[in-house]
Amino acid sequence: MSTPVEPAKRVVVAAPRGYCAGVDRAVVTVEKALDLYGPPVYVRKQIVHNRHVVETLEARGAVFVDELESVPEGATVVFSAHGVSPAVHAEAAERSLKTIDATCPLVTKVHHEAKRFAADDTRILLIGHAGHEEVEGTMGEAPEHTTLVQTPDDVESLEIAEGTNLAWLSQTTLSVDETMETVDRLRKKFPLLMDPPSDDICYATQNRQLAVKQIASAGCDLMIVVGSQNSSNSVRLVEVALEAGAKASYRVDNADEIDPAWLDGVNTVGVTSGASVPDDLVQGVLHFLEERGFPGAVEERLTEETLQFALPPELRKDLRASAVRD
């Protein structure tokens, strides 16, 4: 009697994964500010939602604060990639802080859309998560005109006067599928609902979710998502993997958080990372798997990402001035 042949083990790493253009711009902004001005450079909130990135920048002299009241008057402060409300800009001006705005340009686009809709007296239904810095910043652009919608189930309880002009916007890091389900329910309840001028969910969020779907739907036993707990797009990737057919999916900050028991009976492992994760953390996960008998990873690429964003103008100006002096 022949012995059953064990299925071959396989590791598939998703591409694109990791840093998006907005995250890269924000991290480089803090690094160059530290080089140019010297430490300390203050940063309001986490520059991006990744523990490793924050700790690395802290070691170089960045000081992360929750609110501007913790920043000494006249000091340099960087605003995170998630954006801030006009009230934060005003507070910084009152305290004579030197500000560098590292808000992702795709988030800034949503802020502009909110202002335009509010100027037309349009009620904005903002799809997003309460307490997320990006949502707080966007709502701050037009607080009297904005209503937060967190889940598709929230739509039923919305009470809006008949004849109100309505439009929807969204946080840039959400699940594409869940967001569109929310929009579909909104449109059924409010048939005249207006769309944003262009899609709010960022290209990188969509690409990473599509890449995960591609791997998860092809017999994936386990999907490991590298990313921090407060990273909305990383948490979404875990959900997307399960919805697409992965038998199990877990989020880890790094390889140290992987439970070896997750690998029991597993043949195909998918690996990806959220948009604020440096790739060395992914490589650490791949090394962990190789040490436990899995082969080297095969990269499955969905698309190429070539978008880059210029550094904030206030930083570029000081960098040019420094270059002239040197």
Image (tube, grey):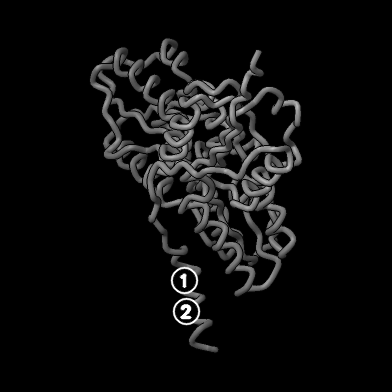
As helix, strand or loop, the secondary structure at mark 2 comes to helix
Who's the residue at 49% across and 81% down the image?
321
Who's the residue at 72% across and 58% down the image?
58
Kind of residue indicated by mark 1: Arg
For the residues labelled 2 and 1, the Cα–Cα distance comes to 6 Å
Horizontal and vertical percent position of residue 173: 48, 37
Kind of residue indicated by mark 2: Arg
Horizontal and vertical percent position of residue 202: 41, 41
As helix, strand or loop, the secondary structure at mark 1 comes to helix
Front one among 296 and 172:
296
Who's the residue at 63% across and 67% down the image?
74
Q: Quadrant of the C terminus?
A: bottom right
Horizontal and vertical percent position of residue 49: 61, 44
Q: Is residue 125 visible?
A: yes
For disc 1, the marked residue is 316
Which of the 4 image quadrants contains residue 187?
Answer: top left
Q: Is residue 322 left or right of residue 54?
A: left
Front one among 175 and 32:
175
For disc 2, the marked residue is 320
Horizontal and vertical percent position of residue 15: 47, 44
Q: Residues within 10 Å of mark 2 (few under 14, many from 20)?
A: few
Who's the residue at 44% across and 23% down the image?
178
Front one among 33 and 11:
11
Front one among 291 and 37:
291
Q: Is residue 124 left or right of residue 262?
A: left
Q: Residues within 10 Å of mark 1 (few under 14, many from 20)?
A: some
Which of the 4 image quadrants contains residue 170?
Answer: top left
Q: Which mark is residue 53?
A: none
